[in-house]
Amino acid sequence: LSSWNVSKVTNMRNMFQMAKSFNSDLSNWNVSKVTNMSFMFNHAEKFNSDLSSWDVSNVTNMEFMFNMAEIFNSDLSRWNVSNVTNMSFMFTKAKKFNSDLRQWNVSNVTNMSFMFAEAENFNSDLSRWNVSNVTDMDSMFSITKRFTSNLSNWDVSKVTTMNFMFAGTEKFNSDLSKWDVSNVTSMQYMFAEAINFDSNLSNWNVSNVTNMNSMFQDAKKFNSNIGKWDVSKVTNMELMFSNASSFNGDLSQWNVSNVINMKAMFNKAKNFNCDLSKWDVSNVTDMSLMFNEAEKFNSDLNKWNVSNVENMRAMFRLAINFNSDLSKWDVSKVTDTSYMFTATQEFNSDLSQWNVSNVTDMERMFAISPIFNSNLSNWDVSNVTNMEGMFAAALSFDSDLSRWNVAKVTNMKDMFNFAIKFNSNLSSWDVSKVTNYKDMFLNAKSFNNRYKPKFR
């Protein structure tokens, strides 16, 4: 097609879309009248013609232009893109692309979502780009693994969404301290797996953000002081600092009163030990895995209002230093406490007054909790169906459980395995629905066999 006269063409949208083997020389094409190049080489997997001399000065739409053009790497440094308004998905998965774009005038662009997502080789200097009209930067550099450009002077004041923006940018660590993010409403996964990122974000205005799900997940070096952030509109903090292994910011003054989801929020945040005693968590419904493997965490949480929480699965699992008094917690809506205190080496709070009447799953709830020995004699466990390994290797546990109503339980496997001090009389338990009680009392050295339930 090298000799085609396309000088009168105004629309090239979809022109070579899905032309997976196409690689004709288009270097001499006159495209000066074209206004739309969206999807032009979308999925043109073998295309790599020299387009350096193209006059694209009238083009307004370049969305998906080189999306999945996997070997495309033409020099586009001299392109005049000053009239383009849409660059979303422009180089997504263009894995070889690494042209110098530092001189591009992108001042009219409003949408840069997914622009360089998974463009694994891209690392142009974009420090002087004028992005002042951009409103959408969703996933702009997601998994752009080599990208390291300085973006400190970017004007992002009109941007409303930054979801996944730097997710998986393994080398990125630009100073973003001066960014005006006051109009951003969603930052989910923004720095997830940005393993070298540690910019000072202390002065960011995040007052309009509602979603911070996984924002710093696996950002292993991040430890900025973000204690003054206004997070009062945020409803989702799931996985926010999960595996952010360096993070230990002071979040004591955060207003989290609108947050509904805190699932795995500090999961594997191994250095985190902030005082969270004053947090208003009254609207939270999911705290599963919240402090799972948060090895240093030991804040006083007794005044927390957890009355709306439904899921506490593995909440403190392997939080080896945790020993807050939780005696006042209202857990009446909770249905899952499985693995909640598994391997909490220091935990021994009085839980005698807990209302667990809605819980259905208590699997390994206190397993490998060596000093736990609260009086649980009055617990209403009438809705529980799974007690597998509940007190396995709970080396100190010896509460009287004789009055427990276990009529709905089907699984008691390993329930007291290695509970070496346990010796409560369970002979009156109704175990008619139990189908698995393998090794229930294995290595329970103090247990009197006369106290065993009467299994069929």
Image: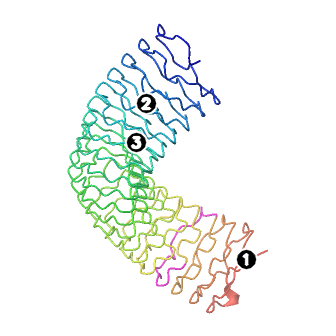
- Disc 3 vs disc 1: Cβ atoms closer than 8 Å? no
| Numbered label attached to residue 88 | 2
Residue at coordinates 28% horizontally, 55% vertically from top-left? 199
**Structural crowding at the residue carrying mark 1, measured as other residues with C-alpha within 10 Å and reported as few (<14), some (14–19) or many (≥20):** some
| Residue designated by label 1 | 438
Q: CA distance from mark 2 to mark 1?
A: 58 Å
- Disc 2 vs disc 1: Cβ atoms closer than 8 Å? no
- Dividing the image into 4 quarters, which one contains the C terminus? bottom right
Residue 380 within the segment the image draws in magenta: yes
Residue at coordinates 55% horizontally, 38% vertically from top-left? 71
Q: Which kind of residue does numbered mark 1 sit on?
A: Lys
Q: CA distance from mark 3 to mark 2?
A: 14 Å
| Numbered label attached to residue 163 | 3
Could you tell me residue 53's position as x and y percent? 42, 24
Please state which of residues 184 and 394 is positioned toward the viewer in this rendering. Answer: 184
Q: Which kind of residue does numbered mark 3 sit on?
A: Asn
N-term mark: 3 or 2: 2
Main SS category, magenta section: loop
Where are the magenta residues, as a range? 368-385
Q: Tell me: residue 266, above or below residue 206.
A: below
Please state which of residues 72 and 24 is positioned toward the viewer in this rendering. Answer: 24
SS at circle 2: loop
